[in-house]
Image: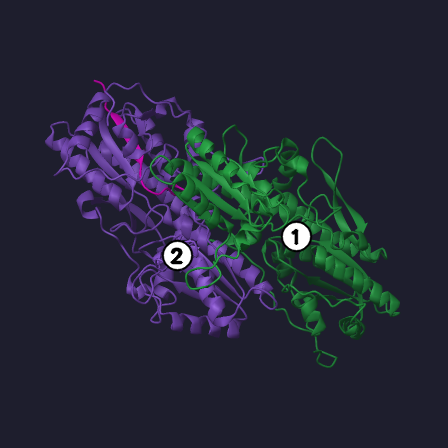
Chain colours: A purple, B green
Amino acid sequence: MKYKNLLYAQSGGVTSVINTTAAGVIETARKSKKINKVYAGRNGISGILKEEIIDTSLESNTQINNLKFTPGGAFGSCRFKLSNPKRDLNQFERLLNVFKSHDIGYFLYNGGGDSQDTTNKIAEFTKNAGFPVQCIGIPKTVDNDLPFTDVCPGFGSVAKYIATSTLEAAMDVKSMSETSTKVFIMEVMGRHAGWIAASSALASNEKGGAPHIILFPEINLVQAKFIKKVKETVLREGYCVVVVSEGVKDARGRFLSDSGRVDAFGHKQLGGVAPRISEMIQSKLGYKCHWSVPDYLQRSARHISSKVDFDQAYAVGKAAVEFSLKGENSIMPIVVRNKSKKYSWTIGKVELKKVANVEKKLPRTYITKDGFYVTKKCKDYLQPLIQGEAFLPFKDGLPVQAKLKNILVKKKLEKFN
Amino acid sequence: MKYKNLLYAQSGGVTSVINTTAAGVIETARKSKKINKVYAGRNGISGILKEEIIDTSLESNTQINNLKFTPGGAFGSCRFKLSNPKRDLNQFERLLNVFKSHDIGYFLYNGGGDSQDTTNKIAEFTKNAGFPVQCIGIPKTVDNDLPFTDVCPGFGSVAKYIATSTLEAAMDVKSMSETSTKVFIMEVMGRHAGWIAASSALASNEKGGAPHIILFPEINLVQAKFIKKVKETVLREGYCVVVVSEGVKDARGRFLSDSGRVDAFGHKQLGGVAPRISEMIQSKLGYKCHWSVPDYLQRSARHISSKVDFDQAYAVGKAAVEFSLKGENSIMPIVVRNKSKKYSWTIGKVELKKVANVEKKLPRTYITKDGFYVTKKCKDYLQPLIQGEAFLPFKDGLPVQAKLKNILVKKKLEKFN
């Protein structure tokens, strides 16, 4: 009897440990005798529609192991939403043809909320079409906004990067503050949920420590209150570190980064939120400001990944294969926090239909009453997620990364438009 | 006989290893029987004028050792230029009084070009005033623009951070490029010299690897040529990573970040060079861009410091004390690259008067003919400087940092205005 092939693919914004999940999938599947080949979609579902399927069996064990040290999406990811199957079945029929032609029995889709909606729809479609493919979602997002799972793989590492960077940059600005920069503003990712911004608070374990102010997308910014707080902080501490989420909104609920302002030439004004906050402080208080926008650096900083996050990223990949082998379908492995005093976790599961398109925001109880900081409850939640340093080999002064051949299997179908 | 005290101070923009130099100074001085106490100026020369002098003998050996893991300036730094002694001797006389009152025999000033000019002037003034203080400059600057020394302590670590971040972020944008971001722009420090921008090239050890384009302050940017190069890169590689120095200038030699543009409200337009380059590419080519400005993160990232840089930072601190004990004056220890096949270095010295106010730019032979990349000669120079990872202990998921008491010695003088 010939066993079925497994198709794994990456979707949405990547993380520093999504390839660790890929390694978890591939290494676990390689050990099983009930899975034939592990394929990977090139650039997620977008490549699968084009029948661009990578044969991972052509990669050495060493290179699959090196995936654990490699940020980004090693097989390519995509921002691509399938059409609504109620209106247009074209893409779903194409996927079914690709699955049939390449004897796919398992489809593992590694992504966030939108992607899991896709995974769920594919499961339903293939079942109804009489060629049931077991579809397992694998959680991944630095935004930490998936429901049910205690944490999303990828988040713990960004949290560690942001907390570390806040700690380090705070030392810098503190030492310059008497005669130079008084306020440092760092803009972090998280358009709709303030989890990453909140993680900066882990840098502070003492009274008066940085960050002093955190701006969340969940709390509309009242400028006068904010400016007052900055001033009080500088007068008290000599300097002020502000961490701002890219998704922060003004008092009327409009994105600060999208206020429709144009420059003298009529171009839409550029820059993220950090330069805007910097301008606000400089014009109101006259303090010299510096600002930072790490952008992709924060979610690809594999060199400072959290060991807990790394382990969880591997575990969800491994579990996805194990669930597949147990005959599970339309589910997603999740991280479950045990009710123990010392932090520990296990892998559970949730039905995909429950996950799809739900966004988990920072609860109000995780934000202080004045809206400018996190509560102890929030720090207690976050603290375990940045624990441990995920080992990384260096060569010639730089992190080692996987070098994959990414060879496509021979196409069997017509071109798809 | 009572031995003299040593006064150490930090000046200018800080680095991730300037406190390692401080540890080199303090640990070496503690071992010597010919130095009484090691004092540190609070906030550099600015605090010394106010007679704000920290007694480092009150810090434990453990905390002095922890300085090696602590970025920023642990005693405070400053941006402060002494008045010209030919016109106003007030500040110099005050310094002399402070030195006399606290029995300072050695003054070690840890800073860049401007600071070494200060150190030199102080040496001359105290000699002429009949209270000669041995003044030793200690090199430090992430900009790597000091002459004579092969490299400036602080630079190797930024170079390692920037090369690592380029490597990591490139994996991210590459994996998203088919359906999303095609161009990633990272703005790095270096207002007048392109050393930091150049170091990003270490991320690429293969044909076609990122970064694809580097923009230096030494080369005026010709927009049409640049846009053509971005387009060619995206067509060939599928994506493009641009590293731009904050000091890049337009074709007419004006800073791109300082073009005098104002927004609709008449405010001076904000934002660094990266968002400007991003706008340029988006408007000319329509590619989706992402941009990053690490700012202080790059020069305070002790968690990814270079071991070579760390060792050199310690060595110049140690050497400064050893030179002091040998009776040297008005000199600065420098890093000398040995003429060996395998990289090795020793500590030499240079007269301060030669160092003061000289800026070492990237030589034209280090930049490719088209102006958009570095030559092999440049990479050969840079490569050894990022070697090795400087060990760093973590606690609760974050780097351990020194906790100094920074207790001031009792003031003996009148207040100074």
Q: Residue at x 86, y 57 (%)?
A: B327
- The stretch drawn in magenta includes residue A15: yes
Closest to the observer, B154 or A318: B154
Amino acid type at circle 1 is Thr
The location of residue A267, given as percent across then percent down, is 40, 52
Closest to the observer, B264 or A91: B264
Q: How many labels does the image show?
A: 2
**Inter-mark Cα distance, 1 to 2:** 37 Å
Q: In this view, does B296 lie above or below B54?
A: above
Which residues are drawn in magenta? A1-17
Badge 1 is on which residue? B141
Q: Please tell me in which quadrant of the rendered image residue A13 appears.
A: top left
Indicate left or right for B69 with A255 as reference: right
Amino acid type at circle 2 is Val
Q: Is residue A328 above or below residue B112?
A: above
Kindly identify which chain the residue marked by label 1 belongs to. Answer: B
Q: Residue at x 54, y 56 (%)?
A: B400
Mark 1 vs mark 2: give the one in front.
Answer: 2
Q: In this view, does A179 lie above or below A169?
A: below
Principal secondary structure, stretch drawn in magenta: loop
One can see residue B27 in this view? no
Closest to the observer, A182 or B348: A182
Closest to the observer, B227 or A112: B227
Indicate left or right for B196 with B82 as reference: left
